[in-house]
Amino acid sequence: MRTALLISAKDLRQRLRDRSVLVFSLLLPLGLALVFSFVLGGVGGGGDVFRYAVVNADGGPVAAVFTDEVLPAVVEGGAVAVRAAASRDEALGLVGSSDVTAAFVVPPGFSAEVSAGRPATIEVVGDVDSPLGVGVARSVAGSFAERLTSVRVSVAAALHGGSTRDPAELVAEAAAATDPLRLVDVPASRRELDMTTYYAAGMTVFFLFFTVQFGVTSLLDERRAGTLARILASPVRPSAVLLGKLTTSLVVGVIGTTVLVVATSVLMGARWGHPLGVALLVVAGVLAATGIVAVVASLARTSDQAGGWQAVVAITLGALGGAFFPVAQVGGPLAALSLVSPHRWFLRGLADLAGGDVAAVFPSVAVLGAFALVGFGTAYALTRREVGL
Amino acid sequence: MTEVLSCRGLLKRFGDLTAVDDVTFTISAGETYGLLGPNGAGKTTIISMVAGILRPDAGEVLVEGVPVSTRTTEPKGRIGYVPQELALYPDLTGRENLRFFARLQGLSRAAVAQRVAHVLDVVGLADRADERAEHYSGGMKRRLHIGMGLLHEPILLVLDEPTAGVDPQSRNAIMDSIRELADSGLAILYTTHYMEEAERLCDRVGIIDGGRLVAEGSRRELVERLAERDRISLSVDGDPAGAKRVAERIPAVLGVAAHGDGLELLVHSARQCLPGVLSALAEQDVHVRAVEVDEPNLETVFLHLTGRALRE
């Protein structure tokens, strides 16, 4: 172990003098995550991805459920910000000036219409330049409307059964008693990441494959430079040389990823989740990336060749695994194929962790560990002759 | 003298090529043993097996009776290995390079500091020790490279063509240093394809060609094998290979090799046969520009044993 640490310490000293490791492990992923997050999701931790205005011209109990309970629940979900507007005209002005993405207008008499079982609508006025945001607003309003329909049936049944209470109050109570409306469909065991976190994590795991290559490909550099022969002529075990190179990759990978986790949290508001779960995922992800990169390096003749191949592998697995786009949401064969990518499992682990339960990352950590084991085993088998094992 | 290195029946194949074929030799303490042969003769392969970085297909390497292999660690601490190519880290300083390899040798921190300082003095880099090696001149890099092999005070120093690509002044300095190391009791295995280096440095020489050790002994012993033979060096115009074919047909010529723009001829008596040789060449339109007749040396021995020149 002493020899492995010596070799790793020497490698790390070299890597620190080689600025490219800083570029690949920190600057590029941080910069790209910022760009992706800004372009596709807005900056600021997801709190103001979409900005809405709401006008409550009704003032009744059913309208209050929408403005005081439904919309705050959506805001709490971290995806939107909502502000009140005094009138429809003010709301239209806000939309026209792009101060808000869309406006909800609850018209006068809305509660009464609902209570009477007559059709009632919440008007959604959207900015033509923000079709996605307008679509989300319509979805929120539509979902509330569907809920009211089912509530109306329940209230009608109650009245039919002899209830003497005010129908409007019954509707409001029933609507409020149901689960708060959420912006995103959430499967039972995990939650989708907000866009900032998603792209911060995506870029981090994508560039991790470039970061960890500095350790394992240095074996090829040492062979070309003749220093590997000199090391092997020293009283060291060949396995210690391999272990030293892997240690370099692991240390660079873990440090680089940890710095990115902290930096994206502080600078971009990314919400990675419970530190212990994140730490498990980071270590497992680094091991998996190192294992795969080690296989590529052991097949190559030179470090340049290895670098080229590793770039192809990293981009392919990154794209497949959803580092640039959430492929899993597409469904079908592509989603199934994405399971062969460690990137997919890293992101899935983070999504599972977003539910708050550290144990939820265990399946993803186990799969990433399997990637690492297979990678290290294959690389060892391919490299052992090289170092005289 | 105490036997330090013993190589017995070394054999190494790379696919269909037999790079080293049944090579056996020994080196004693304080002795400098030269492996002399042209490029591709198998010298570096032998060195790699001796240094424990290449596994022989057959045979064994013993250092003070302890087997050396790619998996053993203990005997490697007794060997100082200096490969042919400059094997150092350009982005580390001279001191950092030495410190790293000293620690790989298992030296304690105190011993590392002491040995690094000593070696920096020996190779004349003490005042530039904290500069990155990439800023060193070629000669300084070569000195640092050799110094790395001395860090752990080995009993056997293995040098693979240490003067390759070195200017004459540095080359002389390196050879003087090696001579001093041998005088201090170090056993030295030295490969070269320069006959002059082998003659100047080596107590014994093993002549290697095509992976086989074709002769071994001191310079005197090897030259005496030639009996009364002379070497004629000819510089010719035109195709030396064609001139070689002509020379091979001359009865008085015992051996001939072509190199560059010249021929090396091995004859019984240069004085008697030189006129006939020149006239035979002239008849075949081979124009001779210069003639030199030498006493037999290791080059002549190599020509006699292999039918080829060292520089071929």
Image (tube, rainbow, N blue to C red):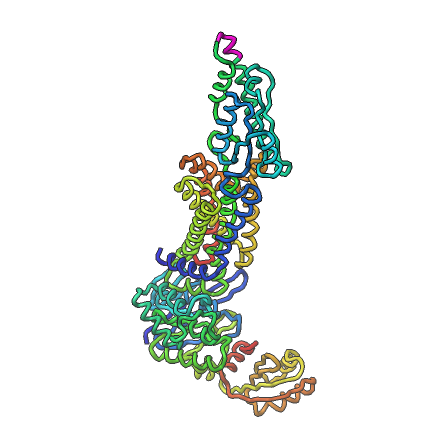
Magenta range: A156-163
Residue B101: where, in percent of width, then height?
38, 65
Residue A115: where, in percent of width, then height?
54, 16
Q: Quadrant of residue B238?
A: bottom right
Residue displayed at 59% across by 84% down:
B253
Compare residues A12 and A337 and report the one nearer the observer. A12
The N terminus of chain B sits in image quarter? bottom left
User: Is A365 included in the stretch rendered in magenta?
Assistant: no
Residue B5: where, in percent of width, then height?
37, 70
Compare residues A135 and A103 and report the one nearer the observer. A103
Q: Quadrant of residue B46?
A: bottom left
Say whether residue A37 is visible: yes
Query: Against B27, is A374 above or below?
Result: above
Query: Against B128, is A289 above or below?
Result: above
Is A386 left, or right, of A108 in this rendering? left
Residue displayed at 56% across by 44% down:
A324
Is A199 left, or right, of A240 in this rendering? right
Compare residues A372 and A30 and report the one nearer the observer. A30
Task: Report the label total.
Answer: 0
Residue A27: where, in percent of width, then height?
50, 53
Compare residues A103 and B105 and report the one nearer the observer. A103
**Most prominent secondary structure in the magenta stretch?**
helix
Say whether residue A377 is visible: no
Is B79 left, or right, of B227 in this rendering? left
Query: Against A113, is B98 above or below?
Result: below
The C terminus of chain B sits in image quarter? bottom right
| Name of the residue lying farthest toward the top | A162
Query: Against B17, is B309 above or below?
Result: below
